[in-house]
Amino acid sequence: MKKIVNLFLISAFLLACMPVNSQDLKFGHINSQELLTAMPESDSAQARIEKLAGDYEQQLEEMRVELNKKYDDYLTNRDNYTDLIRQTKEADITEMQQRIANFEQVAQQDLQSQQQRLLQPILEKANNAIKEVAEQNGFVYVFDVSRGNPVYFSEKSTDILPLVRTKLGL
């Protein structure tokens, strides 16, 4: 009988504590894209990526101009070429087309790699600031609303963007 009473008291105590704990949960939300846009490091990283993309585009344009010259020359003079010269010119044009396609692919991969390399420290800085603000203010969960519209979030959910901006000095 004593065990049943003790079990009942423990159960009643746990049940009484549960609603109190669930009411203490704090939820926050942030638009991380808005935060990243506000960070000055993002502007300089984006400028470097755009410059690199411009350099690659300029190189591609020069290669295309050279290819067009060779192709136009080939079309103009192909009737005057011997079979050997014609085959050599055709092979040269085909090889140049392949070089351009390869350069385009490698340039795209390099741009993605550079973008990831430049943005990684910025993302880490933003995530660390979000984590610190969440811990300092007792948030249990922080949802990123920039990654899709949440189905619902209550007014009880706090927008922590102003707190994170303050933390980062923005």
Image (tube, helix red, strand yellow):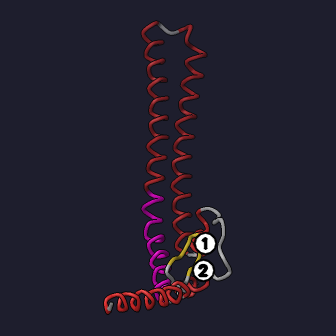
Residue furthest out toward the front: 1
Residue bounds of the magenta highlight: 114-136
Q: Is residue 54 left or right of residue 111?
A: right
Q: Residue at x 55, y 63 (%)?
A: 46
Q: Residues within 10 Å of mark 2 (few under 14, many from 20)?
A: some
Q: Is residue 116 magenta?
A: yes
Marks 1/2: CA distance?
7 Å
- Is residue 29 depicted above or below 47 in this figure? below
Residue that mark 1 sits on:
31
Dot 1 or dot 2: first in sequence order is: 1
Q: Which image quarter holds the N terminus?
A: bottom left
Amino acid, disc 2: Leu
Q: Residue at x 43, y 54 (%)?
A: 113
Q: Main secondary structure of the magenta part?
A: helix
Q: Are marks 1 and 2 in contact (CB under 8 Å)?
A: yes
Disc ID at residue 116:
none
Q: Is residue 156 left or right of residue 89?
A: right
- Can you tell which quarter of the image residue 78 is in? top right
Residue that mark 2 sits on:
161
Q: Secondary structure at mark 1?
A: loop
- Is residue 49 depicted above or below 25 in this figure? above
